[in-house]
Image: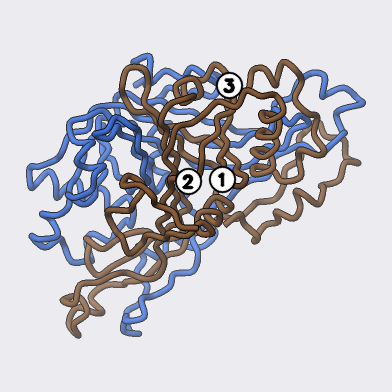
Chain colours: A blue, B brown
Amino acid sequence: MSLSPTPRSTVQRGKKRAVTDRAALARVLDAGLICHLAYVADDGTPRVLPTGYGYEDNTLYVHGSTGAASLRAGAGAEVCVNVTLLDGVIYSRAVFHHSVNYRSATIHGVARQVTDPDAKLHALHVITEHLAPGAWDHARGPSPQEFAKTAVLALDLTEAAVKIRTGGPGEEPEDLTPERIGANWAGVLPLVRNWGTPEACEHLPEHVELPEYVSRRAPQAGPQ
Amino acid sequence: MSLSPTPRSTVQRGKKRAVTDRAALARVLDAGLICHLAYVADDGTPRVLPTGYGYEDNTLYVHGSTGAASLRAGAGAEVCVNVTLLDGVIYSRAVFHHSVNYRSATIHGVARQVTDPDAKLHALHVITEHLAPGAWDHARGPSPQEFAKTAVLALDLTEAAVKIRTGGPGEEPEDLTPERIGANWAGVLPLVRNWGTPEACEHLPEHVELPEYVSRRAPQAGPQ
């Protein structure tokens, strides 16, 4: 299924970076841990905040306190969500062509508040599984009070755009002449994200071993 | 100097995470490589995009193509910029208290387009130095054409908020009883960002050695 059905979700700048299949969107969402949620505040000015998310099928979920301005302003309103993974810094022969390698997904749409208790609990499960896969089945579920003070927004993944940049520097022909081609170092300095060594809570009894659902997020097997 | 001089830049949710000194803002901006820039599009809907940045004294700079909708919409208009570093996933005894450790800065204000040629060149220098320190002095400077098609926005760092979360899970007293305290693993799984091994451009002559300004960004000495 292709993405980009509307002008605002059609990549205008850097079209060669645009990726238009739904599987690419899923790969970016799978790799990310937080998104940036933008909305228009009551005073008409833009706001953006980082927050956790999860997704299932064609729906992205974010959650927050029922008192959060973002959750109140975003319910029933247009929002824009971006998930970006930064993969490296591009060193070019020209200042102008310094850049970054990245994978980025942007989703536009009207967010709807999830109020049905079963649907809301399911959304919280999806969000928790994205952040900490496996944890939902072992941790204490939300109390009525915790459940009541959590708000969930849902956003269709229909109107989305994906941009991906990989590879080395793009250069001007003038910078690839024999005189210029080796004038300064050019290439990619990758950026790698890894899980570190798990740090148990100071109150955790020593007999509680690290579960497989945490240990499989081992160092050198990062979330990217 | 303290931050948070206005209601919208005063942290409302999670106040215990708020940090109000300017040095903390500088540390977050120093650690980040990209920001998320939010603006209100001509149709009144919010947009957010990831982009490089740099800052100097009390001014944040972002740049982009003169044709980019963001740069056009942001000039002379309210924008909101966020820089977030994700430091780990919090596993709690309660689903509700799963969280992340992070450092996050949010800046609000009216962006102004930098049009004076000297000021614009200086801003591009600042942005390039942030992304690739040292590169400006070695790479070819912008040609008149490259310079003309780059737009720069400047934003005061005056109206800003910083939130930082560190440490282990926050738990309810009911989850720290002898029966519950070891019911499931609880702690922090750190997230570590490192530079990888530099990959020279395939066209780079072999005699061009990796310069110190790149090699000092060595693996295991990440940008965080």
Q: Position of residue B59 (x, y in %)?
A: 57, 41
Q: Which residue is mark 1?
A: B58
Q: Chain of mark 1?
A: B
The image quadrant of residue B134 is top right
- Asked if residue B103 is positioned above or below residue B211 in the image, the reply reads below
Q: CA distance from mark 1 to mark 2?
A: 7 Å
Q: On residue B65, which mark appears? A: 3
Image marks 1 and 2: residues in contact by CB distance under 8 Å: yes
Q: On residue B158, which mark appears? A: 2
Q: Position of residue B61 (x, y in %)?
A: 57, 36
Left or right: residue B88 compared with residue B201: left
Q: Amino acid at mark 1?
A: Asn
Marks 3 & 2 on one chain: yes
User: At x 39% / y 67%, what residue is drawn?
Assistant: B188
Q: Position of residue A202 (x, y in %)?
A: 36, 80
Q: Amino acid at mark 3?
A: Ser
Left or right: residue A173 compared with residue B114: right
Q: Secondary structure at mark 1?
A: loop
For mark 1, does the 10 Å Cα neighbourhood hold few (<14), some (14 to 19), or many (20 or more) residues? few
Marks 3 and 2, the one that precedes in the sequence: 3
User: At x 43% / y 57%, what residue is drawn?
Assistant: B102
For mark 2, does the 10 Å Cα neighbourhood hold few (<14), some (14 to 19), or many (20 or more) residues? some
